[in-house]
Image: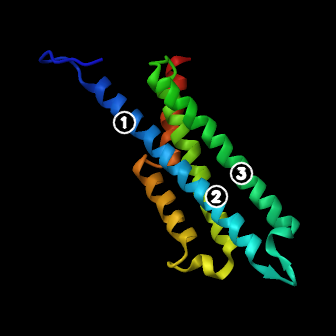
Protein backbone atom coordinates (compact mmCIF):
# COMPACT_ATOMS: atom_id res chain seq x y z
CA UNK A 1 0.00 0.00 0.00
CA UNK A 2 2.77 2.44 0.89
CA UNK A 3 4.72 4.02 -1.93
CA UNK A 4 7.79 6.17 -1.45
CA UNK A 5 8.88 6.42 -5.05
CA UNK A 6 8.95 9.97 -6.45
CA UNK A 7 6.33 10.73 -9.03
CA UNK A 8 4.06 7.83 -8.09
CA UNK A 9 0.37 8.64 -7.77
CA UNK A 10 -0.59 9.21 -4.14
CA UNK A 11 -4.33 9.45 -4.79
CA UNK A 12 -5.00 5.88 -3.66
CA UNK A 13 -3.36 6.57 -0.31
CA UNK A 14 -5.49 9.68 0.23
CA UNK A 15 -8.65 7.79 -0.76
CA UNK A 16 -7.74 5.10 1.76
CA UNK A 17 -7.24 7.71 4.49
CA UNK A 18 -10.61 9.29 3.64
CA UNK A 19 -12.33 5.90 3.72
CA UNK A 20 -10.84 4.93 7.07
CA UNK A 21 -11.69 8.35 8.50
CA UNK A 22 -15.27 7.96 7.27
CA UNK A 23 -15.55 4.58 8.98
CA UNK A 24 -14.12 6.02 12.22
CA UNK A 25 -16.56 8.94 12.13
CA UNK A 26 -19.41 6.53 11.36
CA UNK A 27 -18.46 4.51 14.45
CA UNK A 28 -18.40 7.64 16.60
CA UNK A 29 -21.72 8.76 15.14
CA UNK A 30 -23.20 5.34 15.89
CA UNK A 31 -22.17 5.75 19.51
CA UNK A 32 -23.81 9.17 19.57
CA UNK A 33 -27.10 7.72 18.31
CA UNK A 34 -26.88 4.81 20.72
CA UNK A 35 -26.42 7.19 23.66
CA UNK A 36 -29.34 9.33 22.48
CA UNK A 37 -31.58 6.26 22.43
CA UNK A 38 -30.51 5.30 25.95
CA UNK A 39 -31.23 8.84 27.19
CA UNK A 40 -34.65 8.83 25.52
CA UNK A 41 -35.59 5.47 27.05
CA UNK A 42 -34.49 6.54 30.53
CA UNK A 43 -36.30 9.88 30.31
CA UNK A 44 -39.56 8.40 29.02
CA UNK A 45 -39.54 5.87 31.84
CA UNK A 46 -39.19 8.64 34.44
CA UNK A 47 -41.51 11.28 32.95
CA UNK A 48 -45.14 10.86 34.06
CA UNK A 49 -48.10 12.24 32.09
CA UNK A 50 -51.74 11.50 32.91
CA UNK A 51 -50.55 9.37 35.83
CA UNK A 52 -48.62 7.07 33.48
CA UNK A 53 -44.98 6.98 32.41
CA UNK A 54 -44.54 8.44 28.93
CA UNK A 55 -42.86 5.17 27.88
CA UNK A 56 -46.15 3.32 28.36
CA UNK A 57 -47.83 5.13 25.44
CA UNK A 58 -47.92 3.21 22.18
CA UNK A 59 -46.66 6.07 20.02
CA UNK A 60 -43.57 6.41 22.22
CA UNK A 61 -42.91 2.67 22.05
CA UNK A 62 -43.11 2.80 18.25
CA UNK A 63 -40.69 5.74 18.07
CA UNK A 64 -38.21 3.95 20.30
CA UNK A 65 -38.44 0.77 18.23
CA UNK A 66 -37.87 2.75 15.03
CA UNK A 67 -34.86 4.44 16.62
CA UNK A 68 -33.49 1.07 17.74
CA UNK A 69 -33.97 -0.38 14.24
CA UNK A 70 -32.05 2.46 12.62
CA UNK A 71 -29.22 2.12 15.12
CA UNK A 72 -28.90 -1.63 14.61
CA UNK A 73 -28.83 -1.24 10.82
CA UNK A 74 -26.13 1.41 11.21
CA UNK A 75 -24.20 -0.91 13.54
CA UNK A 76 -24.16 -3.63 10.88
CA UNK A 77 -22.95 -1.15 8.25
CA UNK A 78 -20.15 0.15 10.48
CA UNK A 79 -19.01 -3.35 11.47
CA UNK A 80 -18.95 -4.47 7.84
CA UNK A 81 -17.04 -1.36 6.74
CA UNK A 82 -14.50 -1.84 9.54
CA UNK A 83 -14.05 -5.49 8.57
CA UNK A 84 -13.71 -4.61 4.87
CA UNK A 85 -11.05 -2.04 5.67
CA UNK A 86 -9.13 -4.38 7.94
CA UNK A 87 -9.32 -7.31 5.52
CA UNK A 88 -8.49 -5.20 2.44
CA UNK A 89 -11.71 -6.48 0.88
CA UNK A 90 -12.55 -5.45 -2.67
CA UNK A 91 -15.73 -3.71 -1.50
CA UNK A 92 -13.86 -1.56 1.06
CA UNK A 93 -14.61 1.79 -0.60
CA UNK A 94 -18.29 1.01 -1.14
CA UNK A 95 -18.66 -0.27 2.42
CA UNK A 96 -17.08 2.90 3.83
CA UNK A 97 -19.40 5.13 1.78
CA UNK A 98 -22.48 3.09 2.73
CA UNK A 99 -21.60 3.08 6.43
CA UNK A 100 -20.88 6.80 6.50
CA UNK A 101 -24.05 7.70 4.59
CA UNK A 102 -26.48 5.48 6.46
CA UNK A 103 -25.04 6.03 9.93
CA UNK A 104 -24.93 9.78 9.52
CA UNK A 105 -28.52 10.03 8.34
CA UNK A 106 -29.76 7.57 10.99
CA UNK A 107 -27.97 9.42 13.80
CA UNK A 108 -29.49 12.76 12.82
CA UNK A 109 -32.95 11.17 12.81
CA UNK A 110 -32.43 9.27 16.07
CA UNK A 111 -31.00 12.25 17.96
CA UNK A 112 -33.82 14.44 16.62
CA UNK A 113 -36.39 11.94 17.87
CA UNK A 114 -34.62 11.83 21.24
CA UNK A 115 -35.11 15.59 21.51
CA UNK A 116 -38.79 15.14 20.68
CA UNK A 117 -39.19 12.44 23.30
CA UNK A 118 -37.65 14.75 25.90
CA UNK A 119 -40.34 17.33 25.18
CA UNK A 120 -39.64 20.97 25.90
CA UNK A 121 -36.55 20.25 27.96
CA UNK A 122 -34.98 18.55 24.92
CA UNK A 123 -34.75 21.85 23.08
CA UNK A 124 -32.62 23.47 25.76
CA UNK A 125 -28.87 23.54 25.38
CA UNK A 126 -28.52 22.12 28.89
CA UNK A 127 -30.05 18.81 27.77
CA UNK A 128 -27.67 16.06 26.64
CA UNK A 129 -30.09 15.12 23.86
CA UNK A 130 -29.51 18.53 22.29
CA UNK A 131 -25.72 18.08 22.59
CA UNK A 132 -25.93 14.66 20.90
CA UNK A 133 -27.99 16.12 18.05
CA UNK A 134 -25.34 18.78 17.47
CA UNK A 135 -22.65 16.07 17.51
CA UNK A 136 -24.52 14.00 14.92
CA UNK A 137 -24.96 17.04 12.66
CA UNK A 138 -21.28 17.95 13.07
CA UNK A 139 -20.16 14.46 12.06
CA UNK A 140 -22.51 14.57 9.07
CA UNK A 141 -20.73 17.71 7.90
CA UNK A 142 -17.29 16.18 8.55
CA UNK A 143 -17.96 13.16 6.31
CA UNK A 144 -19.18 15.43 3.55
CA UNK A 145 -22.87 14.90 4.21
CA UNK A 146 -24.82 11.71 3.82
CA UNK A 147 -26.01 12.87 0.39
CA UNK A 148 -22.39 13.38 -0.68
CA UNK A 149 -21.49 9.88 0.44
CA UNK A 150 -24.47 8.45 -1.46
CA UNK A 151 -23.39 10.34 -4.57
CA UNK A 152 -19.90 8.90 -4.16
CA UNK A 153 -21.36 5.40 -3.80
CA UNK A 154 -23.55 5.86 -6.88
CA UNK A 155 -20.52 6.97 -8.89
CA UNK A 156 -18.60 3.85 -7.78
CA UNK A 157 -21.51 1.59 -8.74
CA UNK A 158 -22.02 3.25 -12.13
CA UNK A 159 -18.31 3.05 -12.91
CA UNK A 160 -18.24 -0.69 -12.23
CA UNK A 161 -21.39 -1.39 -14.26
Q: Secondary structure at mark 2?
A: helix
The crowd level at tag 3 (other Cα within 10 Å; few <14, some 14-19, many 20+) is some
Q: How far apart, in angstroms, are the residues tagged by discs 1 and 3? A: 28 Å
Residue 65 — which label? Answer: none
Pointers 3 and 2 in contact (C-beta within 8 Å): no
The crowd level at tag 1 (other Cα within 10 Å; few <14, some 14-19, many 20+) is some
Q: Residue at x 52, y 26 (%)?
A: 83
Which of 40 and 151 lies nearest the eye of the viewer?
40
Pointers 1 and 3 in contact (C-beta within 8 Å): no
Q: Earlier in the sequence, mark 3 or mark 2?
A: 3
Q: Residue at x 49, y 21 (%)?
A: 159
**Up/down of 68 relative to 58, above or below:** above
Residue at which label 1 appears: 18
Q: Earlier in the sequence, mark 2 or mark 1?
A: 1
Q: Residue at x 52, y 18 (%)?
A: 160
Residue 57 at what x, y percent from top left?
Answer: 86, 70
Residue at which label 3 appears: 68
In the image: residue 38, left or right of residue 49: left
The crowd level at tag 2 (other Cα within 10 Å; few <14, some 14-19, many 20+) is many
Tally of numbered tags: 3
Q: Secondary structure at mark 3?
A: helix
Name the quarter where the N terminus is drawn.
top left
Q: How far apart, in angstroms, are the residues tagged by discs 2 and 1? A: 25 Å
In the image: residue 129, left or right of residue 52: left
Residue at which label 2 appears: 110
Amino acid sequence: MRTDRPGEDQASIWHRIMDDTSVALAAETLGTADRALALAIDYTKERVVFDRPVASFQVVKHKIVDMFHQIEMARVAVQFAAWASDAEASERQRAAAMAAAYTSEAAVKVTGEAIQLHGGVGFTWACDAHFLFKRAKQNDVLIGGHAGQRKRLATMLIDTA
